[in-house]
Amino acid sequence: MPGGRGLAVYVALNLEQYSFGEGIVEALVPGGHSPDVANFSWLEYGNRVGAWRLRDLFRELSLPCTLLLNSAVAEHCPDLVAAFAADDAEIAAHGRTNSERQGELPEHDECALILDATETIARCTGVRPKGWLGPWISESHVTPDLLHEAGYSYVLDWCADDQPVWMSTRRGRILSVPYPQELNDSSAIIGRFVSPSDFADMIVDNFDEIVEQSQEQSLVMGIALHAHCIGQPFRLRQLRRALAHIASARERVCLTTAGAIAAHYAGLSETEPGPAIPRVEKLRPVPRTAGTEGIART
């Protein structure tokens, strides 16, 4: 892993924008009708308030950050995105808006969505993103193909391993970097009603366990956050406790970004190439190798 350590840890902050009165909205409060003012306002809070508090926390603990950015946020909240960029946050793409799922679109329309989001983020930030997380982790049968063809080097949709793995596409391969379904405030706190303190304990326990396991094989630990959820003050206090625990162990692990993990792994694969893992419908368990490479082989 980067830095020659066995465990690479990255924090991914989702900055999301929802259309008002149309499309999908995350139902934090049940029973809303269109326009859903209650849920839209709750989500808007993340970009207006929660994200700024999270930025302060990351700066306080000297933690790198990967921004998973709806391209609509780059246009809607340019000052917020610029502030994270000034802190050297990695900018990764998270579609156009979370009011749509790309996996439901015909191939031509999905291709247009990917290119639109990519070009908007590049224009607004000056950086063309290399990583992609689909809104709602939604994919069609050709999403990895389209991402590879659009110039993406890694994708975060596949929560299938604790190591990066290659996926085959129709014109090459794309790297799958581990992204958490469990250490994810949206699925845990909103979806499963996990308390903020329990969510913080989950992060701490996962870190302590995986640090020990990384003595035998190189591993990746991601933490997925959403500004409108974890940016609430009472939840932020518990998150601070968990992230401070991780930051205190920075001499033992590599605190980094998803993009740096992908670049490091791809560099290892260039010197010791191996076959790409078949597409998801054919995925099977793969043996692991111990040591710093952490390369999964078929």
Image (spheres, rainbow, N blue to C red):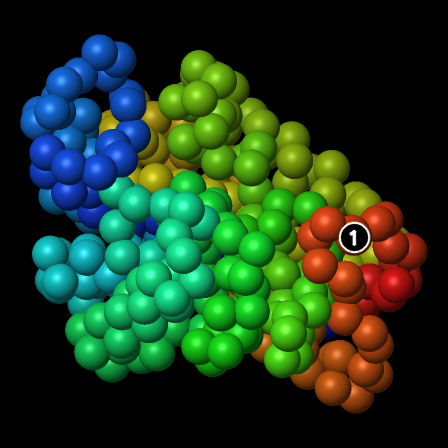
The location of residue 92, given as percent across then percent down, is 39, 64
The residue that appears at 14% across and 18% down in the rendered structure is 33
The location of residue 16, given as percent across then percent down, is 26, 47
- Left or right relative to 22: residue 296: right
- Quarter of the view holding residue 125: bottom left
The location of residue 275, given as percent across then percent down, is 82, 74
Pick whichever, 35 or 178, lies toward us.
35
Answer few, some or many: residues within 10 Å of disc 1's Cα (few below 14, many 20 plus, some between 14 and 19): few
Quarter of the image with the C terminus is bottom right
Looking at the rendered structure, the secondary structure element under dot 1 is: helix
- Left or right relative to 206: residue 109: left
Pick whichever, 72 or 267, lies toward us.
72
The residue that appears at 38% across and 66% down in the rendered structure is 108
- Left or right relative to 121: residue 40: left
The residue that appears at 43% across and 62% down in the rendered structure is 107
- Left or right relative to 270: residue 171: left
Whether residue 264 is visible, yes or no, is: no
The residue where tag 1 is placed is 282
Pick whichever, 216 or 75, lies toward us.
75
Specify the farthest residue to the bottom. 271
- Quarter of the view holding residue 228: top left
The location of residue 66, given as percent across then percent down, is 41, 60
Specify the farthest residue to the top. 31
Q: Kindly identify the amino acid type of the residue bearing the numbered disc 1.
A: Lys
